[in-house]
Image (cartoon, grey):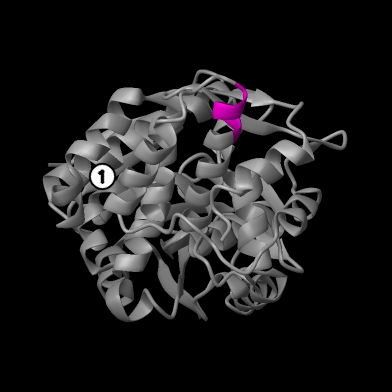
Amino acid sequence: MGSRMPVHMDGTFIYDIVMETSFDGLKEELGKMNLGERKVCIVTDTNVAPLYLNEVEHIISSCFHKTEHFIFSAGEEHKNLNTVRDLYETLIMKQFDRHDYLLALGGGVVGDLCGFAAATYLRGISFIQVPTTLLSQVDSSIGGKTGVDFDAYKNMVGAFHMPKLVYTNVASLKSLSEEQFSSGMGEVIKHGLIKDASYYQWLTEHGSEIQNRNLDILSEMVTVSNRIKRDVVEKDPTEQGDRALLNLGHTLGHAIEKLSDFSLLHGHCVGLGCIAAMAVSVKRGFLHEDQIPALLDVMNLYHMPVTVTGLSPAEIVKTTKSDKKMDSGTIRFILLEQIGKAFVDKTVTDEEMAEGLSQILI
């Protein structure tokens, strides 16, 4: 069942994405890295700690000189510089030096925050990703983008900092709530839309097995999504070009997420943004209008919201102006030329965005 996918940057091997159906293989993977003189701090949150912290701590304890942990309150609202400051303080008190390690055990919030702390503590220390949610396993743990929110501006403070290892236990998806699982599907569907029409079709055909958390099917899904993201990141590690395609649905999605005070999950907001982006693509003549209801069918299959209430197109469009993906005052909007083929467009107008949003706002 286990698999390994290498990630390179500028032709040089950087790390492996290792996929298993338990945490047991972590000991062997870390053993290869000769970390016996190093300390490690497991960074996790109040949702994940009761489920997996003791097990992971026990498995890896013999691989390190000393094992510590840092637990913070779960939720996007805690992905900020205050939590990072608390983590810095813990690392200083425990005398962590630049040869020691952090290990992110959890979802996207944990991985983003732990990675940012690793990138900035003592000008950068090593870290390991152990993602436990669908969203983190298929998206945020891969590619070295780290960051925290600043005054509700999402991921406004961050750094590119590659992990030394991504270790994915696909079986941890069985403990996810229905809502968290469907949020992760937002990023999965996005991968098919931007790069692989056959994968998008596969997702429509395997809905019941995916919903039933069949481990073989989940492993296949996570592997394909990892490969898509890995291939994009290898070509463009710091988002100068092709990597921006991964932002399909994110410009409007981030604005919706912020305006909802993060009451809506990230993957759900991405899915809503994808619907609006598809509507703009239809209006531009790239896609047939029948493809919008087809996307809604896929999202309904995975219990994702396809509408949002209480927001106006004008306030969403206004909020996009503070998005970190702006380029010289222009939004780099991702459109679909066809299913499986996306491109960056800097000419999408506020009016077009507002019209696209009419598909989802009620």
Question: In what quadrant of the picture does the N terminus appear?
Answer: top left
Residue drawn at (59%, 67%) of the image: 96
In the drawing, does residue 14 fall left or right of residue 120?
Answer: left
Q: Which residues are magenta?
A: 280-284
Examine the structure image and report whether residue 281 is included in the region drawn in magenta.
yes
- Location of residue 221 (image quadrant): top left
**Magenta span main SS:** helix
In the drawing, does residue 102 fall left or right of residue 166?
Answer: right
Residue drawn at (32%, 53%) of the image: 300
Residue assigned mark 1: 19
Q: Is residue 273 above or below residue 117?
A: above
- Location of residue 200 (image quadrant): top left
Q: Position of residue 275 (x, y in %)?
A: 50, 43
Question: In what quadrant of the picture does the C terminus appear?
Answer: bottom right
Q: Position of residue 15 (x, y in %)?
A: 42, 36
Callout 1: 10 Å neighbours few (<14), some, many (20+)?
many
Give the SS element for disc 1. Answer: strand
Q: Nearer the viewer, residue 77 or 314?
A: 314
Q: Is residue 344 above or below residue 349?
A: above
- Location of residue 184 (image quadrant): bottom left
Q: Is residue 43 above or below residue 237?
A: below
In the drawing, does residue 59 fall left or right of residue 97?
Answer: left
